[in-house]
Amino acid sequence: MDWADFFHGYVPAAAIFNAHAHFVDGLHDRLSDLNRNDPHLHIQMELSLIGLASHFEAFCKDHFASLINICPQLLERFGASRGDVTIHLSDLLKVADSLPYRMGSVIAEKYDFGSAKKINALFSDLLKISPFTKDEQRRYEMFLEDRNLLVHHGGTYTLAYSRNPIEDIESKYFGYSLIITRESYDEWKEFLIKIVTKVAKTSQISLKEYVNEKGLLLTPEAAEAVDLLTL
């Protein structure tokens, strides 16, 4: 085995997220040149935002998994906060040959990374870090509200959407739609890149501190994987 085996897709989660974000930037530039006068150009921004949300949640889950894959001893701390972690025997059998470096992958599938509050709680129990500040948590919930409006309602404003900008109270619901512009997409993208960068760095530091504190000796491959968490 080598360092890549600790990561989903054999690539550090932060690197996968950043690669996706930059690929979409290039795609936007090419499509904008081809469709400069297309009145429906914003649809590509809607799809891009949905994809951005998907890749960010995947980052959180995959990065969490890789930390345990690299250092399974973290489960001692995680278990102390969470209690017993249940793993089905059938799941263990599926990864029996790779279990020493896939334990985190199995466990991460059992948890919900669908909100800032849940993400904060999971990383806090594992490494005593919080990916989101209170202000960032509120902003991320706004981002998810936009994502959910697009996914579940095609972007059309509903009664539950909290930031409806239409002033006419009798016509704003179920008639107008959220428009994702290149500017608003870029703002969300930069916000999430900032969180990804912070989580990768703080978790790397905290993991190294934990290893030193416990006097653990990582394999050369695991130690290299730690260094690549911020790739």
Image (cartoon, helix red, strand yellow):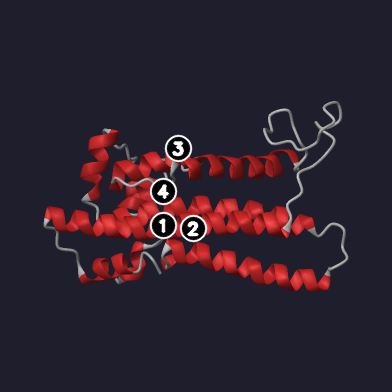
How far apart marks 1 and 4 lie (CA) works out to 7 Å
Q: Nearer the viewer, mark 1 or mark 3?
A: 1
Quarter of the rendering occupied by the C terminus: bottom left
Where is 115 relative to 36, above or below?
above
How far apart marks 2 and 1 lie (CA) works out to 6 Å
Where is 191 relative to 165, above or below?
below
Q: Which residue, given by chain and number where applicable, does mark 1 sit on?
A: 198
Three-letter amino acid code at the position of disc 3: Lys
Q: Which of the pair 187/221 is nearer the observer?
A: 187
How far apart marks 2 and 4 lie (CA) works out to 10 Å
Answer yes or no: do the residues labelled 2 and 1 have beta carbons within 8 Å?
yes
Residue at 46% from the left image edge and 67% from the top image edge: 15
How far apart marks 2 and 3 lie (CA) works out to 17 Å
Residue at 26% from the left image edge and 56% from the top image edge: 207
From this viewpoint, is residue 96 visible?
Answer: no
Where is 59 relative to 121, above or below?
below
Disc count in the image?
4
Three-letter amino acid code at the position of disc 1: Lys
Answer yes or no: do the residues labelled 1 and 3 have beta carbons within 8 Å?
no
